Structures are given as structure tokens and as C-alpha cells.
Amino acid sequence: MRCKKVGSKKVIVVGVLVPFFILSIFACVALALTVDDVARDLICPCGCGKMLDVCEMESAKEMKGLIGEKIAQGETKDQIIGYFVAQHGEKILAAPTKKGFNLTAWVAPFLVIGLGAGIISLVIVKWVLRGKIREEEIKKTQQEEVQGKYAAKLKKELEKFEF
């Protein structure tokens, strides 16, 4: 008994395209924006100082609800954060923006650490060199003392030896 031949091209197309579509659907679901994704970048305006995603105050719940509505309307994370910055100012951001004067908040710590490391290394090098110079001076003065002492003895011995 012979099996009917199914179009091999159809099998290949279906075998390749179906998994591709399934994977693309899962990727879209995995990349979907959630309320917590946005809330992690904001500080609760109630004054508790907590991140919005962990605050349990009523104002935080309201903001999370508003974030959910904006996500449902199709707004991006940047658009939603921009909305809250326009409402509350930059103090609502969990981290300062990386533009303008706020850039110093990102760069200054690294500059201070680098400057501190440079100063410490210069001080250590100076201490090491100072110690070496002192050792050389001590050796030199000790040699001069010893040589002076033996030179005086030699001179006395030579005076006795020469008649």
C-alpha cells in the first residue's frame, strides 16, 4: 500500500512558519509593558521616599492605576514617565536624567573616586621615595663616620710608622 504524497513544499512552509509565528507571539507577550516596569523608575509622591512599585499608600495605588490606563491606551514607558515628570517635576524620577546639569550626578562620583585614587597613589609613592632617600642618607653618613674614624686611626698609625 502506498501513502499519498503530500506536497513537500507545503509541509516545509508549515513546518517553518508555524513555529516562527508561535515564537513571535510569545516574544510580544514577554516584551509587553507592565505597570511595575514603569513604576520601578518613579518615586511615590506621598513623601515616603519609596519606589512607586513597592509603596502601598493610596496615592501610589492611584498612580499605578493611571499607569495601567496609559499602558492600555498604547503609550510607551518614556511617554508615561514624561507625563509624570510634567505633573510632578524631576523629583519623581528614581534616578536623575542623564542630560544637562544632572549629568554631573552620574559623572561626579567616578571623578571623585579617580581623583582620590590618584592622590592616594601619589602620597604612597612620595612616602616610599622619602624612605629610600632617608636610607641612602643614613648609609652615606654612617659610611662617612666609619671612614672618618678609620681615616683618623690610619693617620695616627702612619705617623707612628714614619720616623
Image (spheres, rainbow, N blue to C red):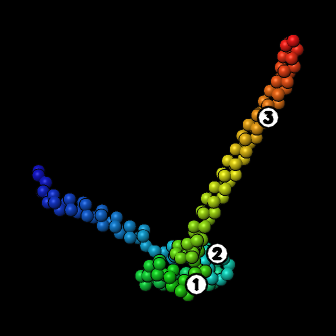
Q: Residues within 10 Å of mark 1 (few under 14, many from 20)?
A: few
Tell me the amino acid under the disc marked 1.
Gly
Pick the front one: 58 or 116: 116
- Left or right, 133 with respect to 64, comes to right
Tell me the tag on residue 50. 2
**Above or below, comparing residue 153 to residue 140 in the picture:** above
> At 27% across and 64% down in the image, what residue appears?
18
* Residue 154 in view: yes
Tell me the amino acid under the disc marked 2.
Lys
C-alpha span from label 2 to label 1: 17 Å
Foreground mark, 2 or 1? 1
Q: Earlier in the sequence, mark 2 or mark 1?
A: 2
Q: Earlier in the sequence, mark 3 or mark 2?
A: 2
The spot of residue 49 in percent (x, y) is 66, 76
Foreground mark, 3 or 2? 3
C-alpha span from label 3 to label 1: 71 Å
The spot of residue 35 in percent (x, y) is 51, 77
Residue receiving disc 3? 141
